């Protein structure tokens, strides 16, 4: 049975409550860990980043962070993990460049569920290999939050390392397991993490792997990464900001004209939604001038793209992600 959040636990809604929570967790982490080492898969997402910052504050370099770059992150995300945690926080960070390994495994694979399984298994394999190289690791930290416990009985779906070989099982350290996402963000802000990390919008576990629709090719993936950065920059500047906004590149060619000649390129589809529970979602109005600015910037700067579309489908019937 899932461990339940104490009824007396006050919701963390301001910096004062966040500071009290941090102080309490630092004490608890020190008592649990002692002088032993802790391993953490640091994706750069909100949950793992907050756990990393909290553990660094509590035990410093006893924490070993492993960041696996699988080539499916958004533009600048791996670089930000290195800058924030290694350069600014002086974390004990291991960076693993596994881009070729993941993309070679995904070559020619078009089925979304197969892609998900490959990405999940490969992540576990890479993480297990890195863990096996380390000595004296006694604990495994995870960014489990309370909705993970309620929805999956304590097993975190994205980057969950529950599939590690038996000889690599460790005692868990889960300092934010009773927090909701909004509370995790307040704690992250108090810990000094940058806003674009603390308020990072929802991102699927397989990353851009399910937004590069169909079989992933490196050139289409790179075009998606560049186009996504433009979409996030422009829509992220709106007031109010939609709950989630991104783009996808579908697996078909689009006819364009360049220098008076017809050629085949790709389409980029912009997606923005508002939701409370992710069960239903509505589409916010995006000013046409913003859409035109996005269109012009993508077509002018992203190689291979000659068409920009806007998806106005709501959930249901459409899902938020394409795959």
Image (cartoon, rainbow, N blue to C red):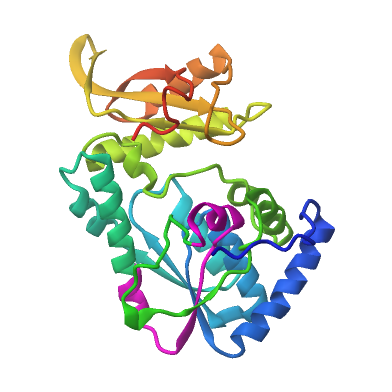
Q: Position of residue 236 (x, y in %)?
A: 59, 32
Between residue 266 and residue 190, name the one nearer to us. 190
Q: Quadrant of the N terminus?
A: bottom right
154 to the left or right of 206? right
Q: Quadrant of the C terminus?
A: top left
Q: Decide whether residue 145 is among the magenta residues.
A: yes
The quarter of the picture where residue 226 lies is top left
Does residue 96 lie above or below 290 as drawn? below
Q: Decide whether residue 35 is among the magenta residues.
A: no
Which residue is painted at 49% across and 15% down in the image? Answer: 292
Q: Position of residue 91 (x, y in %)?
A: 55, 73
* The furthest residue to the left: 108
Between residue 228 and residue 252, name the one nearer to us. 252
28 to the left or right of 171? right
Between residue 96 and residue 248, name the one nearer to us. 248
Q: Position of residue 67 (x, y in %)?
A: 43, 64
Does residue 263 lie above or below 59 as drawn? above
Q: Position of residue 228 (x, y in %)?
A: 43, 35
116 to the left or right of 21? left
* The furthest residue to the right: 16
Task: Write down the region rendered in magenta.
Answer: 127-154
Which residue is painted at 54% across and 34% down in the image? Answer: 244
Residue 175 in view in this figure: yes
* The furthest residue to the top: 260
Which residue is painted at 62% across and 46% down in the image? Answer: 199
Q: How many marks?
A: 0
Residue 132 in view in this figure: no
Between residue 117 and residue 37, name the one nearer to us. 117
103 to the left or right of 209? left
Does residue 171 lie above or below 147 as drawn? below
* The furthest residue to the front: 1
């Amino acid at each position: 049975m899932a461990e339940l959040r104490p009824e007396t636990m006050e919701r963390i809604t301001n910096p004062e409550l966040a500071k009290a929570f941090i102080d309490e967790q630092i004490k608890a982490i020190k008592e649990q860990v002692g002088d032993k080492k802790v391993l953490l898969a640091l994706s750069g997402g909100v949950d793992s980043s907050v756990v990393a910052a909290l553990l660094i504050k509590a035990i410093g370099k006893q924490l070993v962070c492993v960041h696996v770059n699988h080539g499916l992150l958004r533009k600048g995300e791996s670089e930000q993990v290195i800058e924030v945690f290694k350069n600014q926080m002086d974390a004990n960070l291991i960076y693993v460049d596994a881009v070729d390994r993941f993309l070679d495994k995904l070559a020619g694979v078009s089925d979304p569920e197969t892609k998900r399984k490959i990405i999940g298994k490969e992540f576990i394999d890479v993480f297990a290999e890195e863990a096996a190289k380390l000595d004296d690791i006694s604990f495994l930290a995870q960014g489990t939050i309370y909705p993970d416990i309620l929805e999956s009985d304590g097993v975190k779906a994205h980057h969950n390392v529950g599939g590690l070989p038996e000889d690599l099982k460790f005692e868990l350290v889960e300092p934010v397991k009773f927090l909701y996402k909004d509370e995790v963000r307040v704690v992250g802000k108090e810990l000094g993490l940058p806003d674009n990390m603390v308020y990072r919008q929802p991102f699927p576990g397989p990353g851009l792997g399910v937004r590069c629709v169909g079989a992933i090719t490196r050139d289409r993936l790179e075009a998606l990464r560049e186009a996504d950065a433009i979409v996030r920059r422009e829509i992220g500047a709106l007031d109010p900001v939609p709950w989630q906004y991104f783009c996808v590149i579908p697996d078909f060619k689009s006819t364009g004209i360049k220098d008076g000649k017809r050629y085949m390129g790709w389409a980029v589809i912009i997606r923005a939604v508002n939701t409370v529970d992710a069960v239903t979602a509505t589409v916010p109005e995006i000013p046409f001038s913003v859409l035109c600015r996005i269109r012009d910037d993508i077509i002018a700067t992203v190689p291979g793209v000659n068409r920009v579309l806007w998806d106005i489908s709501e959930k249901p019937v459409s899902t938020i992600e394409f795959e």
